[in-house]
Amino acid sequence: MGESTWRNYKETKFHKPLPLKGIRVLEVCTLLLGPSGPGILARLGAEVIKCEVPPMGDTLRSMAPFSYFFKDQSTSLMRPNPNKYWIGLDLHKPEGQQIFRELAARADIIEENLRPGVMERWNVGYRQIVEVNPSIIYISKTGFGQWGQYAEENRPSNDGAAQGMSGYAWISSFPGRPPLKNRLYICDSYGALLGEVAVLAALHYRDRTGKGQYIELSQSEAIMRTMSWVWPYQQITGKGAGPAGNRDVSICPADTFRCVDDTFVAIAAPDEEEFRSLCRAMGRPELADDPRFQDHLTRLQEENATEILRIIAEWARTKTAEEIERLAEEYGFAASRVCSIKDVVENEHFRERGFLTEVDDPLLGEFLDYEFPVMMSRTSPRVRWSVRPVGFDNEYVMRYILGKSEDEIRQLYECGALGKWAQVRGRRPPPDWDGKAGLILSKESI
Amino acid sequence: MEHQRWADWIRERDDPRIASTRPEALDDIVVLDLSYKSFAGCYCSSLLAEFGAEVLRIEPPVGDFIRKCTPYGILYKGEGLNYLSEGRNKFHITLNLEKPEAREILKGLVAQADVLIETFMPGVMDEWGVGYEALREINPRLIYASITPFGQFGPRSRSRMPDYDNIIQARSGNQYDSGEMLPEGKTYDECPWAVPTKAGPWIGWVVAGTYMAVGILAALHWRELTGEGQALDVATSEAYTSLEDWAAIWYQGAGVVSERFGNLNTGGWLYCFAPTKDGAVFLGGLRLEMWQAFADMLGKWDEWGAAEWKDMADFSTKEEQLKWAELVFAETRKYTSEELVRMAVEYGQKGRLAPIAPVVAPVCSPEETMRDPNWLDRGIFTPVQDPVYGEVIVAQAQYKLSETPIRIKWVCRPVGYDNEYIYLKYMGFGPRKLKKLKEAGVI
C-alpha cells in the first residue's frame, strides 16, 4: 500500500511544497458557507486575505456552543478560517473599495457570500472587477443563487433553511416524527466544499486558456445534488421519498442498533459474503439461505428488510458495541460504534495519520485541529495558524502586498476605510495576548 | 453599469440552458475510475465528468455491486436508482482485474490517463502489481486517488472491514449528537426515535468523494506547474468528521461532550426548526438585529423587551434556548408555514428594522422541493433525454458558471456498454481481439 509513498507522511509535511502556492484569494465572507471555501484553499497553500467590515467583522465571531468561547474566540470561527490574513476593510467607503480593487488586480480568486447585488453596489461586483482583472475567478455563494424568484425576493438564507427547503431534513428523520434538523451545518459546509470543485475546475481552465469566469452557487441546490436516488425515485414511482430513521433504504442490512449498555452501533453487511459473515457471527448461519434474504435486491424489499433488521436488533441488544466491532473485524462485515466527539478527539488512528494535528498558535496556544482530509504525497496540505482579531494583519497586507507608505496607511485609518477589532469577546485578542505575538511587520505600531 | 440589471446580465451568461454553447473546463483530462462498492468513488468521478473530463468507468464483468444498492430494491430498466444518478457522462467498460492479462491492459490505459480513482482495501492494488509505486513508473504524471475507510497508512489501515455510508456517519462523530433528545423520564423503548440519528442521503460517501475531487483538482494545478503527479489518500470518516466545526474545540477546551439537542442548535440562537399550524419552518436570526426583527414580526417587540437586548450570547445557553424555544413555538403554531414565510419577506420590505429580516424557510418534503418553480426555473430538475434510459430526472446544475458550465450528456450506461469504442480508441482492440478477451474472462 504505497509503503515508500506514505512513509513518515506526518513528520515530513513541512518539507514539501503546497499545491496552491502563489495563488492569491480575496474573501468577503461571513458565517460558514462563505469562509469555509477560502479556508480549504488556505489549507492547500493559497494566500487568503479575509476582508471584514471593522470593528465587528464576521457574524460567525458571535457563535459558540452554549456560549463557550475558546480564549475569547468563537469555536465555530476556528475551523473554516486557518492560515488566513485578516484585514478590517470597510467596503461602504470609496477608499475601502479602491483598496479592494487594488488587491483584486493582483488576485486570482475572489469569494463572497453577500446577498445578490451587494458587491456591485459597493463597486466591487464581478462586472467591475473584470475591468481591473479580466482573468479573475469570482464565486458568489448564497441561499438561492443570483437569479430566480427567491433571489428576486432578496430572501436571506442559512444552513437550516437549505436543510428545510431541499428536503434533506425530511428524509433524515424518523417516520411519524417532525422533520429533524441535522446537527451539522451541512448545507454550509458541504456547499462550500462543492464550490471549491468549481473554483479549482475554473483554475484548471484558466491554467490552460488564461480565461477567468464567474461562478454562482446556491447552498440548497448544492445539497440537493447529494440526494441521488430521491429524484429519479419520485419521478419513476410517482411517490414521495420519505423518512426512514437510521435505516439505509438502499443497503440491507444497514442500520443503527441499540446495544446492551444503551450505547449504539452501526452495522452494514449488504454483499453476499458480508451478509453470510454477519449471520455466522450472530450464530444464525441458516438466515443466509432463507429465501427472504437470499440476495441483496430481495433483502431490500420492505417486508424482508424490516424482518432482517428486527432479527439483528434483537441480537445487538445482547452485545456491547465493542463486541460487535470485534466480531465485524473477525467475520468480515462492517460495524462501528456511534462515536462521540470524545472518541474522535482521542482516536489514535486519526492522530497517527496526522488528521488530528497539533497547532501551536502564537495567539491561541496549542490545540488540535482537523487537517485537510486529502493527504497529498507530494504537496501536503496543512494548518499553520488560526484565527485573528478583526484587522489584525492590516499593516502586513497594506505594506507588504500593496506597498503603501506609513502616511497612506494612516490616511486609510483616518477615513475609516481601515479599522481594527472592537473590544468585545469574539473580536478582540485572547486575554493573555502580550500585544505582539502573531503580528507581522507591525510590532511597533500598535 | 452597462444599464442592465445584474440578475439579468448574469443569467444571460450562466443559465444552464445555454451550457452546450460553452466550452468545458476539464475536457483535456482522462480519468480511470476503478471504484468498487463505493459511492464515494462514483460521486467523485461524476463531479469531474460533469466538467467534461473523459471518465472511463472500469467495472468487473458482473458490474459494480453499488448498482444493486437501490431504495427498496427498485430497479429502473435494470438499473439501481443511485447508480442511475451517478453514471453521468461516463464511458462504461469492464475489466477483470483478478486476471494478470487484465492488469496489463490497465497499465496500457494508465499510460494514457491523467487521474486514477480506486477504492480497494489498501494493499490490493499493490498485490496486483498496479499500486501507485508501480504505475508511477509507467506514468509519472499520474494522479492516483485512493478512497478507503481508514486510509493508506496508520494503525488501522490494514483492517479488512468494508465501508458503507452508515458506518462512515457513525464513525465520524456526526451521528452521535444529531437527533431528538430523550424526553425526561422516558426510555428508549418508549421513544425509539430519540436516538443518535444519521442523515438520510449518502452524505458520508458524498463528502469523501467531493473532498477527493478537490484534492485531484489541486493536484492537477500542481502538475500544470511542475509536471509532477502524486498519490492522494482519503479516509472516508476523516472527510466527514472534518465538516464538524466546533465540538472538538469545545471538548478540548472545556471537556464537554456535545450531545443531541433536537431541532435547536447548540452552536447558537436563533437557529431552529419550529412547529407551525401545518408543518414546520426553519427560523434563523443569529445576529441580534435579526432576532429582534423576528420578535417584532410576531408583534412581541414590547412584550419580550426586544429593544433592551444586548448580546446574542445571552440567549445561547442551554437553559435560555429551551425557555425561548417554548415562547417562540407557542407563537409559530398560530400560523401556517406559508404565512410565516410571507411575513418575513414582507418584514424585510417594510418592517421597523427593514431591510433586516429573520430567515424563515419552509421545511419541505422532497416532493414539494421537486415541484418548486424556483428550482425548476434554475434548471436543477430538467429531465435528461437519455438514449438508453429515456427521460430521467436527476439533480444537476448545482453550480452555474459563465465560461465552462457543467452539463449532463447522458445519465448512465449498462455494464460494459462502451467496451467496443474505448478499447478500440485506447488499446486498438478490434472486434476479434475483444471477442477473445471476453471469452478468456478478461473483459
Image (spheres, rainbow, N blue to C red):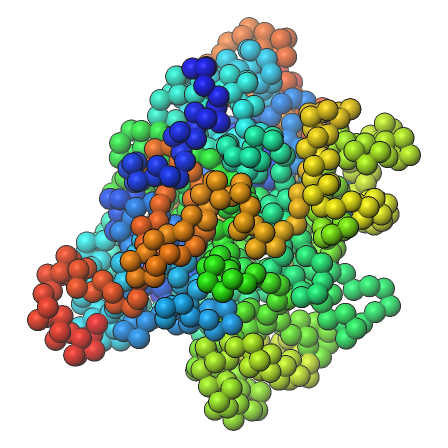
Return the residue nearer the eye: B314 or B43.
B43
Quarter of the rendering occupied by the N terminus of chain A: bottom left
Return the residue nearer the eye: A385 or A288.
A288
Return the residue nearer the eye: B207 or A388.
B207
Compared with A262, A152 (above or below) is above
> In this view, which residue lies farthest toward the right?
B303
Residue A391 drawn at (x, y percent)? 61, 23
Compared with A91, B75 (above or below) is below
Which image quadrant is residue B412 in? bottom left
| Residue at 63%, 34% in the rendered image | A156
Can the viewer see residue A440 in this picture?
no
Q: Does residue B422 appear to the left or right of B176 in the view shown?
A: left
Residue A431 drawn at (x, y percent)? 74, 33
Which image quadrant is residue B91 in? bottom left
| Residue at 56%, 30% in the rendered image | A152
Q: Does residue B41 appear to the left or right of A185 in the view shown?
A: left
Q: How many numbered discs sit on the rendered protein?
A: 0
Compared with A98, B131 (above or below) is below
Q: Does residue A321 appear to the left or right of B152 in the view shown?
A: right
Quarter of the rendering occupied by the C terminus of chain A: top right
Residue A346 drawn at (x, y percent)? 62, 60
Return the residue nearer the eye: B29 or B173.
B29
| Residue at 73%, 74% in the rendered image | A262
Can the viewer see residue A263 in this picture?
yes
| Residue at 58%, 51% in the rendered image | B368
Which image quadrant is residue B317 in? top right
> In this view, which residue lies farthest toward the bottom?
A286
Residue B146 drawn at (x, y percent)? 38, 59
Q: Does residue A339 appear to the left or right of A225 in the view shown?
A: right
> In this view, which residue lies farthest toward the front?
A238
